[in-house]
Protein backbone atom coordinates (compact mmCIF):
# COMPACT_ATOMS: atom_id res chain seq x y z
CA UNK A 1 0.00 0.00 0.00
CA UNK A 2 1.33 3.39 -0.99
CA UNK A 3 1.98 5.76 1.90
CA UNK A 4 2.83 9.40 1.44
CA UNK A 5 5.51 9.85 4.07
CA UNK A 6 6.80 12.96 2.33
CA UNK A 7 3.86 14.71 0.72
CA UNK A 8 6.11 17.29 -0.90
CA UNK A 9 7.64 14.55 -3.09
CA UNK A 10 4.40 13.26 -4.66
CA UNK A 11 4.00 14.59 -8.21
CA UNK A 12 0.30 13.71 -8.62
CA UNK A 13 0.82 11.55 -11.71
CA UNK A 14 -2.19 9.28 -10.98
CA UNK A 15 -0.05 6.18 -11.65
CA UNK A 16 -1.04 4.50 -8.39
CA UNK A 17 -4.74 5.23 -8.93
CA UNK A 18 -4.59 3.88 -12.50
CA UNK A 19 -2.92 0.59 -11.62
CA UNK A 20 -4.83 -0.36 -8.47
CA UNK A 21 -6.72 -3.63 -9.25
CA UNK A 22 -9.29 -2.95 -6.52
CA UNK A 23 -9.89 0.71 -7.36
CA UNK A 24 -9.19 1.56 -3.74
CA UNK A 25 -7.02 4.58 -4.53
CA UNK A 26 -8.76 7.85 -5.28
CA UNK A 27 -7.12 11.21 -5.93
CA UNK A 28 -8.14 13.97 -3.55
CA UNK A 29 -7.48 17.69 -3.83
CA UNK A 30 -5.64 19.30 -0.93
CA UNK A 31 -6.06 22.86 0.32
CA UNK A 32 -3.54 24.15 -2.26
CA UNK A 33 -5.49 22.59 -5.14
CA UNK A 34 -3.17 19.66 -5.97
CA UNK A 35 -4.16 15.97 -6.27
CA UNK A 36 -2.84 13.34 -3.87
CA UNK A 37 -3.68 9.63 -3.51
CA UNK A 38 -6.09 8.51 -0.83
CA UNK A 39 -6.19 4.77 -0.02
CA UNK A 40 -9.26 2.91 1.20
CA UNK A 41 -7.45 0.52 3.55
CA UNK A 42 -10.50 -1.77 3.79
CA UNK A 43 -10.35 -2.55 0.06
CA UNK A 44 -6.55 -2.70 -0.22
CA UNK A 45 -5.04 -6.18 -0.73
CA UNK A 46 -1.43 -5.00 -0.24
CA UNK A 47 -0.35 -6.07 -3.73
CA UNK A 48 2.15 -3.16 -3.83
CA UNK A 49 1.50 -2.42 -7.49
CA UNK A 50 1.01 1.22 -6.52
CA UNK A 51 4.39 1.30 -4.82
CA UNK A 52 6.10 -0.32 -7.81
CA UNK A 53 4.87 2.32 -10.28
CA UNK A 54 5.49 5.42 -8.18
CA UNK A 55 7.89 7.75 -10.05
CA UNK A 56 9.16 9.20 -6.79
CA UNK A 57 10.12 5.83 -5.32
CA UNK A 58 11.30 4.16 -8.54
CA UNK A 59 13.75 5.13 -11.26
CA UNK A 60 13.79 4.51 -15.02
CA UNK A 61 16.54 2.65 -16.83
CA UNK A 62 18.70 4.83 -19.05
CA UNK A 63 17.95 4.54 -22.79
CA UNK A 64 21.69 4.08 -23.42
CA UNK A 65 21.96 6.50 -26.32
CA UNK A 66 23.95 9.65 -26.82
CA UNK A 67 21.51 12.50 -26.37
CA UNK A 68 21.47 14.88 -29.33
CA UNK A 69 19.87 18.33 -29.53
CA UNK A 70 18.38 20.14 -32.51
CA UNK A 71 16.90 23.54 -33.24
CA UNK A 72 13.70 23.01 -35.26
CA UNK A 73 11.06 25.04 -37.11
CA UNK A 74 7.94 23.72 -38.80
CA UNK A 75 8.00 24.81 -42.46
CA UNK A 76 4.27 25.58 -42.25
CA UNK A 77 4.32 29.18 -40.99
CA UNK A 78 0.65 29.11 -40.00
CA UNK A 79 1.18 26.10 -37.73
CA UNK A 80 4.31 27.64 -36.26
CA UNK A 81 2.51 30.88 -35.45
CA UNK A 82 -0.26 29.02 -33.61
CA UNK A 83 2.26 26.91 -31.68
CA UNK A 84 4.11 27.94 -28.51
CA UNK A 85 7.52 27.57 -30.11
CA UNK A 86 8.50 25.94 -33.43
CA UNK A 87 5.49 23.72 -34.16
CA UNK A 88 7.27 20.36 -33.87
CA UNK A 89 4.56 18.63 -31.84
CA UNK A 90 2.04 19.18 -34.65
CA UNK A 91 4.28 17.16 -36.98
CA UNK A 92 4.42 14.30 -34.48
CA UNK A 93 0.63 14.35 -34.24
CA UNK A 94 0.26 14.30 -38.01
CA UNK A 95 2.61 11.33 -38.33
CA UNK A 96 0.77 9.26 -35.70
CA UNK A 97 -2.75 10.13 -36.87
CA UNK A 98 -1.93 9.21 -40.49
CA UNK A 99 -0.96 5.75 -39.24
CA UNK A 100 -4.32 5.38 -37.48
CA UNK A 101 -2.84 6.09 -34.08
CA UNK A 102 -3.95 8.01 -31.01
CA UNK A 103 -2.47 11.16 -29.47
CA UNK A 104 -2.63 12.06 -25.77
CA UNK A 105 -1.98 15.55 -24.45
CA UNK A 106 -3.13 18.42 -22.25
CA UNK A 107 -6.34 20.20 -23.22
CA UNK A 108 -9.00 22.49 -21.77
CA UNK A 109 -12.39 21.15 -20.72
CA UNK A 110 -15.62 23.19 -20.93
CA UNK A 111 -14.59 25.18 -17.83
CA UNK A 112 -11.06 25.79 -19.07
CA UNK A 113 -9.66 23.45 -16.47
CA UNK A 114 -6.60 21.61 -17.83
CA UNK A 115 -7.06 17.88 -18.33
CA UNK A 116 -5.33 15.07 -20.20
CA UNK A 117 -7.31 13.48 -23.00
CA UNK A 118 -6.79 11.80 -26.38
CA UNK A 119 -7.47 12.52 -30.04
CA UNK A 120 -7.99 10.21 -33.02
CA UNK A 121 -8.33 12.88 -35.71
CA UNK A 122 -5.80 15.50 -36.78
CA UNK A 123 -8.20 18.41 -36.23
CA UNK A 124 -8.78 17.15 -32.67
CA UNK A 125 -5.05 17.45 -31.98
CA UNK A 126 -5.29 21.23 -32.19
CA UNK A 127 -6.59 21.20 -28.61
CA UNK A 128 -3.11 20.12 -27.49
CA UNK A 129 -1.38 23.01 -29.22
CA UNK A 130 -0.03 25.79 -27.00
CA UNK A 131 1.43 25.84 -23.50
CA UNK A 132 -0.87 25.52 -20.50
CA UNK A 133 0.78 26.69 -17.31
CA UNK A 134 -1.33 24.62 -14.93
CA UNK A 135 -0.99 21.02 -13.75
CA UNK A 136 -3.15 18.86 -15.99
CA UNK A 137 -5.40 16.21 -14.51
CA UNK A 138 -4.17 12.84 -15.85
CA UNK A 139 -7.30 11.00 -14.76
CA UNK A 140 -7.47 7.49 -16.25
CA UNK A 141 -5.48 8.30 -19.41
CA UNK A 142 -2.71 5.84 -18.47
CA UNK A 143 -5.35 3.09 -18.58
CA UNK A 144 -6.72 4.38 -21.86
CA UNK A 145 -3.26 4.53 -23.42
CA UNK A 146 -2.54 0.94 -22.36
CA UNK A 147 -5.80 -0.23 -23.89
CA UNK A 148 -4.91 1.35 -27.25
CA UNK A 149 -1.40 -0.11 -27.06
CA UNK A 150 -2.76 -3.59 -26.38
CA UNK A 151 -5.01 -3.18 -29.43
CA UNK A 152 -1.90 -2.57 -31.52
CA UNK A 153 -2.49 1.13 -32.17
CA UNK A 154 0.39 3.59 -32.24
CA UNK A 155 0.15 5.90 -29.23
CA UNK A 156 1.83 9.27 -28.90
CA UNK A 157 1.72 10.37 -25.27
CA UNK A 158 2.87 13.87 -24.34
CA UNK A 159 3.12 15.34 -20.88
CA UNK A 160 5.43 16.86 -18.30
CA UNK A 161 8.56 14.94 -17.36
CA UNK A 162 6.99 13.44 -14.23
CA UNK A 163 3.84 12.42 -16.14
CA UNK A 164 5.89 10.58 -18.75
CA UNK A 165 7.97 8.86 -16.08
CA UNK A 166 4.72 7.88 -14.35
CA UNK A 167 3.32 6.44 -17.59
CA UNK A 168 6.45 4.43 -18.34
CA UNK A 169 6.47 2.91 -14.86
CA UNK A 170 2.73 2.23 -14.98
CA UNK A 171 3.06 0.28 -18.25
CA UNK A 172 5.83 -1.87 -16.70
CA UNK A 173 6.90 -3.28 -20.08
CA UNK A 174 8.10 -1.42 -23.18
CA UNK A 175 5.74 -1.13 -26.15
CA UNK A 176 7.19 -0.75 -29.64
CA UNK A 177 4.05 1.17 -30.65
CA UNK A 178 4.42 3.81 -27.92
CA UNK A 179 6.07 7.19 -28.53
CA UNK A 180 6.64 9.32 -25.45
CA UNK A 181 7.35 13.04 -25.53
CA UNK A 182 8.03 15.06 -22.41
CA UNK A 183 7.53 18.79 -22.44
CA UNK A 184 10.38 20.40 -20.54
CA UNK A 185 8.74 21.93 -17.54
CA UNK A 186 9.45 24.93 -15.31
CA UNK A 187 7.02 23.50 -12.75
CA UNK A 188 3.25 23.08 -12.62
CA UNK A 189 1.04 25.73 -10.98
CA UNK A 190 -1.95 24.93 -8.80
CA UNK A 191 -5.29 24.38 -10.62
CA UNK A 192 -6.97 26.08 -7.67
CA UNK A 193 -4.89 29.22 -8.15
CA UNK A 194 -5.59 29.21 -11.88
CA UNK A 195 -9.33 28.93 -11.18
CA UNK A 196 -9.14 31.93 -8.87
CA UNK A 197 -7.38 33.85 -11.62
CA UNK A 198 -10.05 32.86 -14.17
CA UNK A 199 -12.80 33.86 -11.76
CA UNK A 200 -11.25 37.29 -11.31
CA UNK A 201 -11.11 37.80 -15.09
CA UNK A 202 -14.73 36.69 -15.48
CA UNK A 203 -15.81 39.18 -12.82
CA UNK A 204 -13.75 42.01 -14.26
CA UNK A 205 -14.93 41.51 -17.85
CA UNK A 206 -18.48 40.46 -16.98
CA UNK A 207 -18.48 37.57 -19.43
CA UNK A 208 -17.74 33.87 -19.79
CA UNK A 209 -14.34 32.78 -21.09
CA UNK A 210 -14.43 31.32 -24.60
CA UNK A 211 -10.69 31.05 -25.25
CA UNK A 212 -7.39 31.19 -23.35
CA UNK A 213 -3.93 31.44 -24.88
CA UNK A 214 -0.93 31.52 -22.59
CA UNK A 215 1.54 32.07 -25.40
CA UNK A 216 0.03 34.30 -28.07
CA UNK A 217 2.71 35.41 -30.56
CA UNK A 218 0.99 38.56 -31.79
CA UNK A 219 3.87 40.60 -30.29
CA UNK A 220 6.50 37.96 -30.99
CA UNK A 221 7.78 34.68 -29.58
CA UNK A 222 9.97 36.16 -26.85
CA UNK A 223 7.47 38.82 -25.73
CA UNK A 224 4.44 36.55 -25.87
CA UNK A 225 1.09 37.52 -24.39
CA UNK A 226 -1.52 35.89 -22.18
CA UNK A 227 -4.90 36.36 -23.87
CA UNK A 228 -8.40 35.55 -22.68
CA UNK A 229 -11.39 36.10 -24.95
CA UNK A 230 -14.93 36.45 -23.59
CA UNK A 231 -18.37 35.68 -24.99
CA UNK A 232 -19.31 39.37 -24.87
CA UNK A 233 -16.56 40.25 -27.33
CA UNK A 234 -14.15 41.65 -24.73
CA UNK A 235 -10.50 40.60 -24.75
CA UNK A 236 -7.91 40.60 -21.98
CA UNK A 237 -4.34 40.81 -23.31
CA UNK A 238 -1.14 41.28 -21.33
CA UNK A 239 2.47 40.49 -22.14
CA UNK A 240 4.55 38.02 -20.19
CA UNK A 241 5.97 40.84 -18.07
CA UNK A 242 2.59 42.50 -17.47
CA UNK A 243 0.28 39.59 -16.66
CA UNK A 244 0.01 39.02 -12.93
CA UNK A 245 -0.56 35.25 -13.18
CA UNK A 246 2.63 34.86 -15.21
CA UNK A 247 4.51 37.00 -12.67
CA UNK A 248 3.52 34.61 -9.90
CA UNK A 249 4.31 31.57 -12.04
CA UNK A 250 7.78 32.81 -12.94
CA UNK A 251 8.35 33.72 -9.27
CA UNK A 252 7.75 30.02 -8.46
CA UNK A 253 5.11 30.97 -5.91
CA UNK A 254 2.39 28.42 -6.57
CA UNK A 255 4.07 25.40 -8.10
CA UNK A 256 3.43 21.88 -6.87
CA UNK A 257 5.78 21.12 -3.93
CA UNK A 258 7.43 18.22 -5.80
CA UNK A 259 8.49 20.60 -8.58
CA UNK A 260 11.23 21.97 -6.34
CA UNK A 261 12.93 18.54 -6.29
CA UNK A 262 11.72 16.81 -9.47
CA UNK A 263 12.84 13.19 -9.84
CA UNK A 264 12.16 13.10 -13.59
CA UNK A 265 14.51 15.83 -14.76
CA UNK A 266 17.93 15.25 -16.31
CA UNK A 267 16.51 12.72 -18.79
CA UNK A 268 15.13 10.43 -16.09
CA UNK A 269 11.59 10.18 -17.46
CA UNK A 270 12.38 7.51 -20.05
CA UNK A 271 10.97 9.65 -22.86
CA UNK A 272 11.85 9.16 -26.51
CA UNK A 273 11.91 12.88 -27.22
CA UNK A 274 11.98 16.08 -25.16
CA UNK A 275 10.46 19.33 -26.42
CA UNK A 276 11.10 22.89 -25.25
CA UNK A 277 11.52 26.45 -26.39
CA UNK A 278 15.03 27.03 -27.64
CA UNK A 279 15.81 30.07 -25.50
CA UNK A 280 19.15 31.61 -26.43
CA UNK A 281 19.11 30.32 -30.00
CA UNK A 282 19.72 33.84 -31.34
CA UNK A 283 23.17 33.93 -29.73
CA UNK A 284 24.51 30.64 -31.08
CA UNK A 285 22.50 30.39 -34.33
CA UNK A 286 21.52 33.98 -35.24
CA UNK A 287 20.71 32.94 -38.80
CA UNK A 288 18.05 30.56 -37.47
CA UNK A 289 16.30 33.10 -35.25
CA UNK A 290 13.30 35.16 -36.44
CA UNK A 291 11.18 35.69 -33.27
CA UNK A 292 8.43 33.45 -34.65
CA UNK A 293 9.38 30.48 -32.48
CA UNK A 294 12.12 27.87 -32.44
CA UNK A 295 11.69 24.46 -30.87
CA UNK A 296 14.40 22.63 -29.04
CA UNK A 297 14.16 18.88 -29.41
CA UNK A 298 16.44 16.39 -27.72
CA UNK A 299 16.56 12.81 -28.95
CA UNK A 300 16.65 10.44 -26.00
CA UNK A 301 16.22 6.99 -27.56
CA UNK A 302 16.75 5.06 -30.77
CA UNK A 303 13.01 5.14 -31.37
CA UNK A 304 13.07 8.91 -30.90
CA UNK A 305 15.82 9.20 -33.50
CA UNK A 306 13.82 7.17 -36.02
CA UNK A 307 10.69 9.29 -35.51
CA UNK A 308 12.72 12.49 -35.75
CA UNK A 309 14.16 11.42 -39.10
CA UNK A 310 10.68 10.75 -40.45
CA UNK A 311 9.21 14.15 -39.53
CA UNK A 312 12.38 16.12 -40.39
CA UNK A 313 11.27 16.47 -44.02
CA UNK A 314 8.76 19.08 -42.86
CA UNK A 315 11.15 21.03 -40.66
CA UNK A 316 14.09 23.32 -40.83
CA UNK A 317 16.60 21.66 -38.52
CA UNK A 318 20.01 22.48 -37.15
CA UNK A 319 22.02 20.28 -34.79
CA UNK A 320 23.14 22.27 -31.78
CA UNK A 321 25.43 21.99 -28.77
CA UNK A 322 23.79 20.21 -25.84
CA UNK A 323 25.88 21.96 -23.19
CA UNK A 324 24.89 25.35 -24.59
CA UNK A 325 21.26 24.25 -24.70
CA UNK A 326 21.32 23.26 -21.03
CA UNK A 327 23.00 26.52 -19.99
CA UNK A 328 20.10 28.49 -21.52
CA UNK A 329 17.37 25.96 -20.73
CA UNK A 330 18.28 24.68 -17.23
CA UNK A 331 14.80 23.18 -16.73
CA UNK A 332 16.05 20.25 -18.83
CA UNK A 333 18.10 19.04 -15.89
CA UNK A 334 17.37 21.22 -12.84
CA UNK A 335 14.39 21.92 -10.62
CA UNK A 336 13.43 25.49 -9.76
CA UNK A 337 14.41 26.91 -6.39
CA UNK A 338 11.83 27.04 -3.63
CA UNK A 339 10.35 30.49 -3.03
CA UNK A 340 10.15 31.21 0.68
CA UNK A 341 7.10 33.40 0.06
CA UNK A 342 5.12 30.38 -1.14
CA UNK A 343 3.64 29.64 2.30
CA UNK A 344 2.58 33.25 2.71
CA UNK A 345 0.93 33.29 -0.72
CA UNK A 346 -1.20 30.22 0.00
CA UNK A 347 -2.29 31.76 3.33
CA UNK A 348 -3.27 34.96 1.54
CA UNK A 349 -5.13 33.20 -1.30
CA UNK A 350 -7.44 31.57 1.26
CA UNK A 351 -8.80 34.92 2.37
CA UNK A 352 -8.31 37.24 -0.60
CA UNK A 353 -8.85 37.55 -4.33
CA UNK A 354 -6.04 36.23 -6.52
CA UNK A 355 -4.66 39.65 -7.49
CA UNK A 356 -4.71 40.91 -3.90
CA UNK A 357 -3.00 37.79 -2.54
CA UNK A 358 -0.27 37.94 -5.16
CA UNK A 359 0.25 41.70 -4.89
CA UNK A 360 0.64 41.50 -1.10
CA UNK A 361 3.06 38.58 -1.38
CA UNK A 362 5.20 40.14 -4.10
CA UNK A 363 5.20 43.55 -2.40
CA UNK A 364 6.59 41.95 0.74
CA UNK A 365 9.30 40.38 -1.36
CA UNK A 366 10.09 43.70 -3.06
CA UNK A 367 10.15 45.53 0.30
CA UNK A 368 12.62 42.99 1.65
CA UNK A 369 14.91 43.46 -1.36
CA UNK A 370 14.81 47.25 -0.92
CA UNK A 371 15.51 46.90 2.81
CA UNK A 372 18.48 44.60 2.13
CA UNK A 373 19.79 47.02 -0.48
CA UNK A 374 19.58 49.95 1.95
CA UNK A 375 21.36 47.94 4.66
CA UNK A 376 24.06 46.98 2.17
CA UNK A 377 24.61 50.61 1.14
CA UNK A 378 24.78 51.72 4.81
CA UNK A 379 27.40 49.05 5.53
CA UNK A 380 29.42 50.26 2.53
CA UNK A 381 29.36 53.83 3.84
CA UNK A 382 30.40 52.68 7.32
CA UNK A 383 33.23 50.53 5.97
CA UNK A 384 34.47 53.29 3.68
CA UNK A 385 34.55 55.79 6.52
CA UNK A 386 36.82 53.65 8.66
Image (cartoon, rainbow, N blue to C red):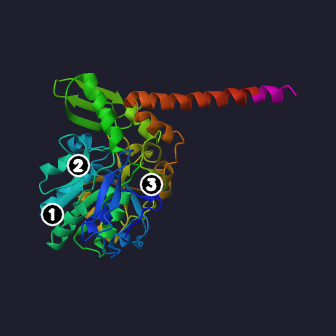
Within 10 Å of disc 2 (Cα), the crowding (few <14, some 14-19, many 20+) is many
Mark 3 near mark 2, Cβ–Cβ under 8 Å? no
Identify the residue shown where x is 26% and y is 25%.
Answer: 203
Tell me the quadrant of the picture where the C terminus can be found. Answer: top right
Q: x and y percent of residue 78 in the render? A: 21, 41
Relative to 69, is 208 on the left or the right?
A: left
Q: x and y percent of residue 218 in the render? A: 29, 31
Give the Cα distance between marks 2 and 1.
16 Å
Q: x and y percent of residue 211 in the render? A: 21, 35
Q: Is residue 321 visible?
A: no
Q: Main secondary structure of the magenta part?
A: helix
Q: Of tags 3 and 1, which is closer to the observer?
A: 3
**Mark with earlier residue (2, 1):** 1
Quadrant of res 206: top left
Q: Which residue is mark 1?
A: 101
Within 10 Å of disc 3 (Cα), the crowding (few <14, some 14-19, many 20+) is many
Mark 2 near mark 1, Cβ–Cβ under 8 Å? no
Q: Which residue is mark 3?
A: 258
Q: Which mark is residue 378?
A: none
Identify the residue shown where x is 36% and y is 64%.
Answer: 165
Within 10 Å of disc 1 (Cα), the crowding (few <14, some 14-19, many 20+) is many
Quadrant of res 302: bottom left
Q: Of tags 3 and 2, which is closer to the observer?
A: 3
Q: Which mark is residue 128?
A: 2
Between 177 and 19, the one lying in front of the other is 19
The furthest residue to the right: 386
Which secondary structure lies at badge 3?
A: helix
Mark 3 near mark 1, Cβ–Cβ under 8 Å? no
Q: Is residue 308 visible?
A: yes
**Mark with earlier residue (3, 1):** 1
Q: Which residues are magenta?
A: 379-386
Amino acid sequence: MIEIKKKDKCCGCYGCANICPKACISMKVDNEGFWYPNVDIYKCINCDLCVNVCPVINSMKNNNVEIKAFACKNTDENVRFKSSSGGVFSLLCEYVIKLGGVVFGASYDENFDVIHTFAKKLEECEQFRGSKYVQSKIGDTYKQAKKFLEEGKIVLFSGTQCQIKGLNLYLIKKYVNLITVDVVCHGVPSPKVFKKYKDSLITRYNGEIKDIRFRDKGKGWREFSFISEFDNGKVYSKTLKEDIYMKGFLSDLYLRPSCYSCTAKNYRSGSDLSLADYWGVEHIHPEFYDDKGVSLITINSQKGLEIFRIISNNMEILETDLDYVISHNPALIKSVKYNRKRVKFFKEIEKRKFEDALTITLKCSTFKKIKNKINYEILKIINNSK
